[in-house]
Amino acid sequence: MAKQYIIGVIVSNIAGVLSRVSGMFTRRSFNIDSLTVGETESSEFSRITIAFHGDDEIKDRIIRQLDKLHDVKEVEVLDKHETVIRELLLIKVRNTPETRQDIMTAVEIFRSKIVDYSPSSLTIELTGETSKIDAFIELVKPYGIMEMCRTGIVAVERGERCLKTIK
């Protein structure tokens, strides 16, 4: 049975590393649900967070293949119960006098915020777990989604546990 895995990968912060990591998934026909990347606390390293569905065998193969890549310094499967997982959504919704109050109520309930206001549109920023993002999108669909952008999952382990940047 396929389940979702989230892995954290520390890589050298140099050109071409992301291409090699994503290329490894392509060559082996693994599908990526979400991929985010950014510089870490050290400018020498970047952190890639990858979410994918599969079974334990696929997960193990992915980890082995990532470990073989030269610029990969650390790979770790993140336990969903021991990890803070978030995603960012920017969504532009049609703004009319008839729907404005309903949309603003949804913004308040979901603890999001309006980051751009015009007479014809509202741009809303929402951060949270994927299920919260999905629920908000479904709620505002009837008002008319003009545009949206999601970051994908970012994740960091709770407490003292950290991905190491030294291999």
Image (cartoon, rainbow, N blue to C red):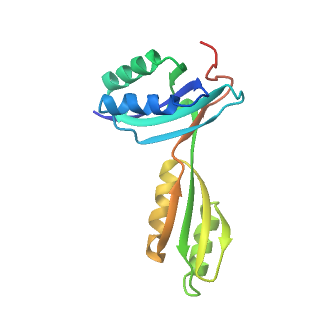
- Which corner quadrant of the image does residue 110 belong to? bottom right
Where residue 99 appears, x then y in whole percent? 55, 82
Q: Which of these two is toward me, 23 or 146?
A: 23
Q: Which residue is drawn at 58% across and 69% down?
A: 106
Q: Residue at x 57, y 24 (%)?
A: 11
Q: Tell whether 159 sits left or right of 69.
A: right
Q: Residue at x 46, y 56 (%)?
A: 134
Q: Residue at x 61, y 28 (%)?
A: 13
Extreme-top residue of the structure: 167
Vertical relation: 132 (above or below) 164: below
- Total marks shown come to 0
Vertical relation: 2 (above or below) 135: above
Where residue 39 appears, x then y in whole percent? 65, 34
Where residue 53 appears, x then y in whole percent? 36, 36
Where residue 164 appears, x then y in whole percent? 63, 19
The quadrant of the picture occupied by the C terminus is top right
The quadrant of the picture occupied by the N terminus is top left
Vertical relation: 27 (above or below) 72: below
Extreme-front residue of the structure: 15
Q: Tell whether 41 sits left or right of 15.
A: right
- Which corner quadrant of the image does residue 122 belong to? bottom right
- Which corner quadrant of the image does residue 38 belong to? top right
